[in-house]
Amino acid sequence: MKLNKNLVLIGMMGSGKSSIGKILSKKLEFEFIDTDSKIEEIEKKTISEIFKKNGEKYFRNIEEVISLKSLKLNNKVIALGGGGYINPTIRKYTLKKCISVWLDWKNETLINRIKNSKKRPLAMKMNNLELQKLIIKRSTMYNLSDYKINCDKLNKKQIVEKIINLYENS
Ligand code: S3P
């Protein structure tokens, strides 16, 4: 099989990395890897349970191991967790070996999507202002990715088409 670079989706919680990633993987006929789901599978706990029982530091360590392991494969569509790309080792590897796409949305869209999510332990303890600050801080890192898609005015199909186009022409 031809060895193709991984297509890596990055962005905040609620940016649609998993749902867009699944569609992309079918179109490209690549396997889809959601690093959060992989972590839950291996740990046999939800992300929330891991944060609660083992703490964020423990989660970040497994996140690094699982993300790097996934990034070292080929022909995958990979959805990194919202904090994954903030880790310099994960970010550097992604930039060196993969094609990365940032799913960018207006802050208020993201805040509305994530503020009540029970699946997202980090967001649960933050108010809107704190979430906004986190989005702004992380955006400087997300901005280092190969491509950025402004998703607000696009539907899912258009987002997918844009990404396929970028990937195939890169
Ligand atoms: C996190 C995002 C989550 C998950 C964890 C921490 C973050 O993934 O990895 O709750 O730090 O932004 P999603 O971006 O898939 O929600």
Image (spheres, helix red, strand yellow):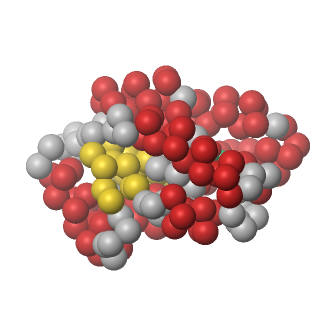
Q: Name, please, the residue furthest toward the right.
A: 53
Name, please, the residue furthest toward the left: 169
Which percent across, then down, holds residue 123? Answer: 71, 54
Q: In the displayed structure, does residue 120 sit left or right of residue 80?
A: right
For the residue pair 95 and 40, the one nearer the viewer reads as: 95
Horizontal side of residue 57 vs 4, given as left or right: right
* Quarter of the figure that contains the N terminus: top left
Tell me the residue at 54%/29% (across/down): 87
Tell me: 53 left or right of 77: right
Residue 132 at what x, y percent from top left? Answer: 60, 51
Q: Can residue 49 be seen in the rendering of this structure? A: yes
The image quarter containing residue 162 is: bottom left
Residue that appears at 76% across and 37% down: 56
Q: Position of residue 35 (x, y in %)?
A: 55, 47
Give the number of marks: 0
Q: Quadrant of residue 20?
A: bottom left
> Residue placed at 31% from the left, 49% from the top?
148
Above or below — where is 113 with respect to 40? below
Q: Is residue 29 above or below residue 142?
A: below
